[in-house]
Amino acid sequence: MPRKRKTENKGLPARWQLTHGAYYYRVPPGLEALWDGKTRFRLGSSLPDAYRAWAERMGAKDKATTIGQLLDRYALEVVPTKAPTTQAQNQVALKKLRLTFCAWPLTAIEPHHIYTYADARTKTVTGPDGKPQRVKARTAALRELEVLSHAFTKAVQWGYMKRHPFAREVRLEGEKPRDRYVEDWEIAECLSLASKRRKGSVRAAQAYIRIKQLTGLARGDLLRLRPAVDFKDDGIHVQRHKTAGSTGKRTIYLWNDDLRAAVKDAEAARPVNISPWLFCNREGVGYINEKTGRAGGWESLWRNFMDRVMTETKVTVPFNEHDIRAKVASDAESVEHARALLSHADSKTTERVYRRKAERVNPLKSKG
């Protein structure tokens, strides 16, 4: 009878152990030569590092018969192809999924199990307005189930099964799209915030707002702009980072006087005169960490800027960078124009998530 796994090891792949802050793999007897002659191989101090090390050592699995085996192959072959931030999120999701489904046969899962999984993570609490609200555990569960669904899509591709067991058969209620619309006067308040310095964080945040308000560029694309590479005679050339490995979507934002002025302000706000990046820190380095996909320095800059906005201006409800992107879509003259600005492949996403203004309609004329 196999030994019961310790609490800290539950949800990890088979033969993994978390010991003294690091992940180890217990090498099966006879395979030590494949793992530098060790019986316990140190994979890394974080889940992303551990999965990368494991993927380098392991080949494709034999045909999977359990969901746990399917998730193992998914972690090895699919997760590493995603963006760094998505990889980290998927690895956390896989650990949660293993806790429930690891030993299940592939053919055992049915649509009602998906509903049960989501409901088990949902708790109802009373909100500040006295109305019942769902806690965010359900949102996390929905993200995990997205990973599980994709894993089963790969299972069909890999020949483990003939059909997906719950695709198009489950309709889970997702989180309500954010509806915060940033008014013009709120943008004006942000841009009026005084700064004692001609360069620095306040000026950079204000220039960033101007460019985002004109283009709708996502944060990752905006912070990756390099004037010498991306600025051409006709406009700003952008290949969406999110879809660079799939659709390769490209957009050219044509120059006008407002966009040129906003870019000039951004260049003037840089803390150093020479840098390949339009937005950079004091060392002239861009804010995006390409290994992790995070932009910690910029997040701190933006958080401090918004703290000042909330205390020194008339703005009373905070907003995030994504809300400015939604403002662009909401203010565009049509859904198609909004879709093009945000470079969405499908206008349904633009309409459902980003168009936040109330629809204006003329009433019918009376027949009486």
Image (cartoon, grey):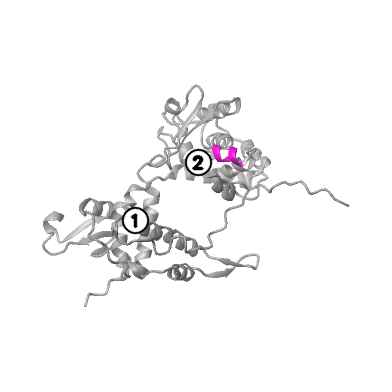
Give the residue number, with chain letter if any, for mark 2: 218
Q: Which residue is located at x 60 percent, y 49 percent?
A: 318
The magenta-colored residue range is 335-340
Q: Which x, y percent locates residue 226? A: 44, 30
Helix, strand or loop for disc 1: helix
Question: Who is closer to the viewer here, 41 or 307?
Answer: 41
- Tell me the number on the disc at residue 154: 1
Query: Which is more toward the observer, 136 or 348?
Result: 348
Can residue 119 be seen in the rendering of this structure?
yes
Q: Does 273 appear in magenta?
A: no
Mark 1 Cα shell of 10 Å, populated few (<14), some (14-19), many (≥20): some
Residue 206 sits above or below residue 51 on the image? above
Q: Amino acid at mark 1?
A: Lys
Q: Amino acid at mark 2?
A: Ala
Q: Residue at x 54, y 46 (%)?
A: 322
- Is 267 placed above or below 184 here? above
* Nearer-N-terminus badge (2/1): 1
Of circles 2 and 1, the one toward us is: 1
Seen from this angle, which residue lies furthest bottom?
1
Measured in 3D between alpha carbons, the distance from the residue under mark 2 to the one under mark 1, in whole angstroms, is 29 Å
- Residue 211 percent across, percent down from the top left: 55, 34
Q: Secondary structure of the magenta portion, mostly?
A: helix
Image coordinates of residue 275 in percent, x first then y, are 42, 28
| 74 over 213 or under it: above or below | below
